[in-house]
Amino acid sequence: MSDAQIPQPNHGKTALKLVGVVVTMGALAWAAVPFYDWFCRVTGFGGTTNTAETGSEVILDRTIKIKFDASLERDMPWSFKPTVHEVEIRIGETGLAFYEAHNPTDEPVAGSASYNVAPFNAGGYFTKIDCFCFEEQVLQPGETVLMPVTFFVDPEIIEDDEAAANSHITLSYTFYQIDLPERVEDTAAMTPDAAPAPTRTSYN
């Protein structure tokens, strides 16, 4: 067979196919992030908690211990701790706990809290009504604040044999530093006489 009769590879089609594969993989990776987040929130996988606007209408006689843990990402200058390390509440009862954060530096520092619940199988039953972790936090120089979290353990936990066997649930938060919001940057740039007084309640 002569060279003229040998089929020549179509480099254009090959390149087009490769581009299609890359675009498809990128789209799947992008879609996987919100899907994974949704999956975790619905199932409690990985210790992700649920949220609710109000407390549970059902409160059981059975109790469970809730433990609180706090940590900081590297380079986060705050101090951060729970005001109590453990409470015991009835399943379905609304609980309230506080975490204390302090900014020892001479400049405003913004932070955001990530969280999880352990054991992981209890995550889908631990429900937050309100939490400081829902919003970014900004502490002024030397400021100390108490930050609340309101929660309950869903009574449906008793229908899950594995999750119901837990004697306690640990709620953990980790604060990491983020960029200051523009409004705070603008305030920090003012002279001391021009800057408005902080409106946030401090516990010094």
Image (cartoon, rainbow, N blue to C red):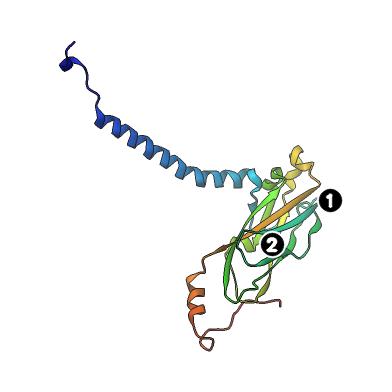
Q: Residue furthest top?
A: 1
**Place of residue 42 in the rendered image (x, y in percent of width and height, measured from the top left):** 61, 45
Q: CA distance from mark 1 to mark 2?
A: 23 Å
Tell me the mark number nearer the camera, choosing from 1 and 2.
Answer: 2
Image quadrant containing the N terminus: top left
Circles 1, 2 touching at the beta carbon (< 8 Å): no
Residue 15 vertical placement versus 58 (above, below): above
| Location of residue 103 in the rendering, given as x and y in whole percent from the top left corner | 64, 72
Which quadrant of the rendered structure holds the C terminus?
A: bottom right
Question: Residue 109: where, in percent of width, then height?
Answer: 58, 70
Closer-to-camera residue (120/81) = 81
Identify the residue shown where x is 47% and y is 71%. 182
In this view, 137 is above or below 68: below
In the rendering, which numbered label is found on residue 149?
A: 2
Q: How many marks?
A: 2
Closer to the camera, 81 or 24? 81
User: Which numbered marker is on residue 24?
Assistant: none
Q: Badge 1 is on which residue?
A: 61
Task: Characterize the local packing of mark 1: few (<14), some (14-19) or many (20 or more) Cα atoms within 10 angstroms.
Answer: few
- Helix, strand or loop at label 1? It is loop
The three-letter code of the residue at mark 1 reads Asp
Q: Is residue 134 left or right of residue 2?
A: right
Q: Residue 71 placed where, x, y %?
A: 68, 58
As drawn, which residue projects farthest toward the front?
Answer: 3
Q: Name the amino acid, label 2.
A: Val
User: Residue placed at 65% from the left, 73% from the top?
Assistant: 104
Residue shown at 77% from the left, 55% from the top: 67
Circle 2 Cα neighbour tier, 10 Å, few/some/many (<14 / 14–19 / ≥20):
some
Q: Nearer the viewer, residue 8 or 126?
A: 8
Among the two numbered marks 1 and 2 on one chain, the one whose residue lies closer to the N terminus? 1
